[in-house]
Amino acid sequence: MLSLLLAATPALPLDEAGKYVAGAYVVFVVLLVVYVGIMASKVQRIERELREVAEFAEKRTPESGTAADREEAGV
């Protein structure tokens, strides 16, 4: 049934179809740029949070750690 429907629909002339193809490419590129922008912002946020966690871990002393950390440190 689908093949009959596709066979019955006329093809677009090349000069008219080119506009739709160009439009589809433009939409695709815009969506791709938006996706890359979103991913870049997420990576920046994750890097910032990871830096904060690393700074916290460096500042942490054995006295303020867990009981297991205090045992390892001999406190």
Image (cartoon, grey):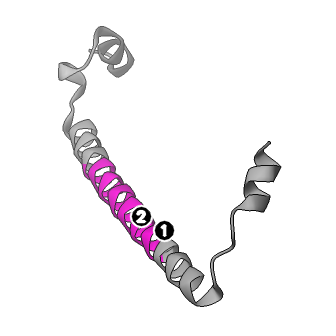
Q: Nearer the viewer, residue 49 or 58?
A: 49
Q: x, y (%) of residue 6?
A: 74, 57
Residue that badge 2 annotates: 31
Give the prevailing secondary structure in the magenta stretch.
helix
Q: x, y (%) of residue 63?
A: 19, 20
What secondary structure is found at the residue carrying circle 2?
A: helix
Taking 31 as reference, is 57 above or below it? Answer: above
Q: x, y (%) of residue 50?
A: 31, 45
Taking 46 as reference, is 64 above or below it? Answer: above
What secondary structure is found at the residue carrying circle 1?
A: helix
Q: Nearer the viewer, residue 12 or 45?
A: 12
Residue 63's disc number: none
Q: Quadrant of residue 1?
A: top right
What's the residue type where badge 1 is placed?
Phe
Is label 1 in contact with label 2 (beta carbons under 8 Å)? Answer: yes
Q: Residue at x 18, y 21 (%)?
A: 64
State left or right for residue 8 relative to residue 57.
right
Taking 53 as reference, is 22 above or below it? Answer: below
Circle 1 residues within 10 Å: few <14, some 14–19, many ≥20: few
What's the residue type where badge 2 is placed?
Leu
Q: x, y (%) of residue 52?
A: 22, 45
Q: Nearer the viewer, residue 34 or 18?
A: 18
Q: Is residue 37 magenta?
A: yes
Rendered-image quadrant of the C terminus:
top left
Q: Residue at x 43, y 69 (%)?
A: 27
Q: Which residues are magenta?
A: 26-48
Q: Residue at x 33, y 52 (%)?
A: 42
Residue 28's disc number: 1
Q: Residue at x 74, y 60 (%)?
A: 8
